[in-house]
Amino acid sequence: MLENYAKCLIQVGLHVKPNQVVVIQAPVEVYPFVQLLSKEAYLTGARDVIVRYSDEILSHDRYLYAKDIDKVPSYVVDFYNQTAQEEACYLFLVGDDSNLMKDVDPKKITNYRKAFRKATAFYRDQLDFMHCQWCIAAVATKAWSKQIYGHEDTHRLWQDIFQVCYIDNQDPVVTWEKRKEQFEKRVSWINQLDIHTLHYSNALGTNLLVELPEQYQFSGGSSTLVDGTSYFANLPTEEIFAAPLKKGIQGKLVASMPLSYQGTLIKDFWFQFKDGKVIDFDAKEGKFEFNGYHFIIVDLPGTYSLSAYSPEELYVRKNLVENTPDIVINVVDGSNLERNMYLTMQLIDMNFPMVIALNMFDELEKSGDKFDYMSLASMLGTPIIPTICRNGQGISKLFETVLEVYNGTNDIASRHIHVNHGDLLEKSINRIRTAISHGATDLGSKYSLRFLAIKLLENDNDVAQIIASERNHEEIVAVAYEEKKRIEAEFHESSESAIVDAKYGFISGALKETYHQQTIKNKQNTFSEKIDGIVTNRFLGYPIFFLILFFIFEGTFKIGQYPMDWIDAFVGKIGEY
């Protein structure tokens, strides 16, 4: 079978021309197969066969330790550009461990690839403008087979490669000639459909419109050089494709399969397109390596609290409880601290190990405001790391701190702190907590009992249902009822409002000590802030509001009368005929 596969790659994939130079790039592990390829190329009429072996461990170490990684050696540039000048053909054999580069900074890989493409522009042009054949094909390696099957089994992987490439005991050239004819029929059929727009949808939420340009042409199967030589750039291949209209892509594309990108496995990701550009994207889960640790990042919907008022809040809370995370990274908007801190208080109630990512820190600094985030971190017992996510600033420090908290070596996180709601409320919380702890179930292994007690005082229906399954639920409900009545009598407001007020009181006091806004005299208000200052003025606000209503009323009935008269006159004229 290997001999037939070699024949397929040389005569079908590359379609080597007489007296042509063949360049093979392959993992050193599959050198016996490369020997078969070299022999087949010479028998087919190749003038020379040049093999460039690669070792993924050496490549990994080079990315990890080499200096000036984004500089491409001149001998590498000369090799590719000179062989392209001779119109060589190129066979790329792939079988790498897709997780090997997981501890390498992706920017290093990206920068090198950009530098390589720029330095070998002539080589790329020869391939792109159909002067040189090229083919990418799979080979079986130990690392790749282990990734697929969970253990090393290169024999099984070779058999799977043969199956998807239609390699059997028959002549592969004949087999692929028939497949080429099938592709040509399919391409001809789809081009006759005169399609203007493609609509993609799936059960995951994909709803994507792709507009095709005028005089588009679908292609598929083999490609053809300017001299008429046909070849297959990918083996195996099943694709039929066309270029979309540049600004003609609208909607959402949700991936149905994970993506391995430069050592990171990304799951459940999506892109939002508008006029051909990606305007938003996200992923629910991503895997990567950092400092020898394997991270699984799960992105939950954005929310300002963990109350039971919206599906998003319930979903986030349920996910945190049922899939207990090792660490919670709480992303806080640096330009809106007070509102974001309420969620932080609730996460502290839930007793999750946490690191706060103080995002948009550059905007906070530009405002001229002063924020002693280290002091606030000490108050909360939670590390706070300034970040600027759009350029990656602070991200490495963030994950270094995550590892410190995980390993119990972070001084700030080692101080176990709960938000104090005041003596009266704390007494109620502790009494309900004690009642819950009398139950026979292992509720405390999933939930913070303090969090459950607070939620009962907030009249949380979801938590009430959880408590209903407890052996002593009647005792818990009775204690909670007594404490709510006592709080209402003392504060003259509901227990829920008292808890909220206490939390915001703590937030207000903490920020008063650590966050100092630029004085009004020196601070430059934005245009919207200036408008807000006028329309929300305690004296001018209501007159402005009623004045706006008056203009809307007048505009609707007086100005709107003109087009109504025009329409009546137009209809009347038509009636005369």
Image (cartoon, helix red, strand yellow):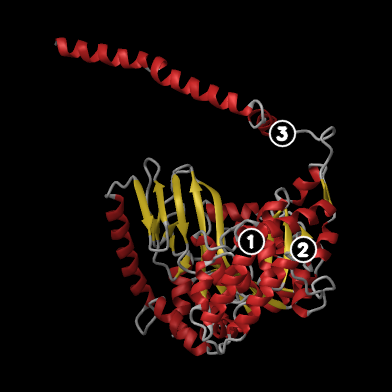
Q: Which mark is residue 69?
A: 2
Q: Which mark is residue 526?
A: 3
Looking at the image, residue 565 lies above or below residue 57: above
Give the percent coordinates (x, y) of residue 276: 49, 45
Give the percent coordinates (x, y) of residue 149: 51, 86
Give the percent coordinates (x, y) of residue 109: 69, 64
Q: Quadrant of residue 64?
A: bottom right
Instruction: Give the Cα separation between the discs numbered 1 and 3.
Output: 45 Å
Which of the marked residues, 1 or 3, is nearer the chain's N terminus?
Answer: 1
Question: Front-most of 283 and 37?
Answer: 283
Q: Residue at x 81, y 60 (%)?
A: 376
Name the residue type under label 3. Thr
Query: Disc 2, disc 1: CB below 8 Å?
Result: no
Give the percent coordinates (x, y) of residue 434: 65, 81
Q: Quadrant of the N terminus?
A: bottom left
Q: Quadrant of residue 20?
A: bottom right
Which of the marked residues, 2 or 1, is nearer the chain's N terminus?
Answer: 2
Question: Front-most of 232 and 212?
Answer: 212
Instruction: Give the Cα separation between the discs numbered 3 and 2.
Output: 44 Å
Query: Disc 3, disc 2: CB below 8 Å?
Result: no
SS at mark 1 in the image: helix
SS at mark 2 in the image: loop
Name the residue type under label 1. Ala
Q: Residue at x 56, y 27 (%)?
A: 545
